[in-house]
Amino acid sequence: MKESKILIEYEGFFSHFIVNELIQNLYKINKANKFQTTVFKKVLVVMIEMLENNYNYIESIKFDLPEDIKSPYFKIVQTSKGIEIESSNPLKYEHLDDLKSRINEINKCNRQEIKEFYLKTLVAGMNTSKKSAGVGLIRIAKVAQNKIKSSFDHSDNNFLYYTLQIIVNYKKDT
Amino acid sequence: MENLFIEPTEFSPKVILDVKNKRFELSGVSRPEDVVAFYESITLKAEDYVSQMLKNEDVLKELTFELTFDLIYINSASSKYILQILDIFKKLSLKGSVVNCNWYYEDVDDQILEDGEDLSEVIRMDFNFIDRK
């Protein structure tokens, strides 16, 4: 395959309902395209984690968002190397350093280290009062078995536009 | 003590705590919209059950408790609570009861199998991994 093909694309604020619609779309696309089972299952996990991260983060800052802020965005692209999953959303400047350092920490890990990092974070988050254990981003890298690509574009004095991208490669032996 | 039964939905799993038959089951999809609200009542009920059982050492020695996880998908937020549930029931095995944990998966490519292996490692408890086919 020479050209990339967009399989799913959505621009706008997400809800639990929209996330579910997009998941159903992926099932339909898989039925038509018959992706390798492993690839499909990995894409599904990465997609749900990315969309839930996007949705939950926006929910947590929704009262601070200006009306004219750029909308969140999500897409899945089929390329010659694999399936690329991308998610974007506004990000408060005050959250930039923590997020960048988390991504750097994840990208430094090899496959074994990412598993250990995931398990360590899961245990640490088990009895905290936070809603989740904070393993979403780590799980994305662990399942995709690839490095996370990210970009942070200036939006206004309080916000950036954050894009997260990762690829799930096709299995070589099938 | 009363049983716990929660009907499954498109986003949340079926939950059973069967007091008489000494079994707990979680099955289906786990990515509830409000993960805290969904799992809090379950962990409280499980805590309550285990606390009552821990009061009677003679019963504990004879007790065999079955945990069944027959899940299709777990989001990372749910993993935290599943780990808490496992931790609660693990208290029974630490006091001499037999706690069998059956973890179902569809095939070796299944992420749910990897999730189960991760949770088993973290909680330091052997799981029986069962192919659903």
Image: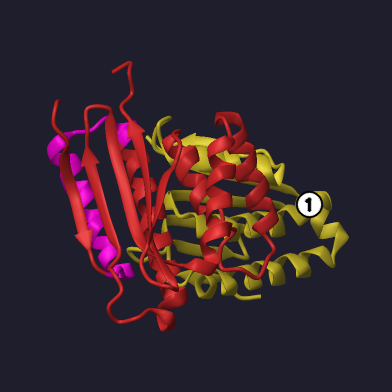
Chain colours: A red, B yellow
Residue B20 screen position, x and y as percent? 62, 64
The amino acid at mark 1 is: Glu
- The secondary structure that dominates the magenta segment is helix
Q: Residue at x 50, y 72 (%)?
A: B38
Does B110 sit left or right of B94 as displayed? Answer: left
Q: Residue at x 58, y 58 (%)?
A: A98
Residue A126 screen position, x and y as percent? 66, 59
SS type, badge 1: helix
Quick one: quadrant of the C terminus of chain B?
Answer: top left
Front residue of B30 and B21:
B30
Does A33 sit left or right of A155 as displayed? Answer: left
Residue linked to disc 1: B62
Does B129 sit left or right of A149 as displayed? Answer: right
The image quadrant of residue B80 is bottom right
Residue A79 screen position, x and y as percent? 22, 33
Magenta-span inclusion, residue A35 = yes
Can you say whether B21 is above or below A82 in the image? below
Residue B64 screen position, x and y as percent? 70, 50
Can you say whether A1 is above or below A44 in the image? above
Magenta-span inclusion, residue B102 = no
Does A170 sit left or right of B57 as displayed? Answer: left
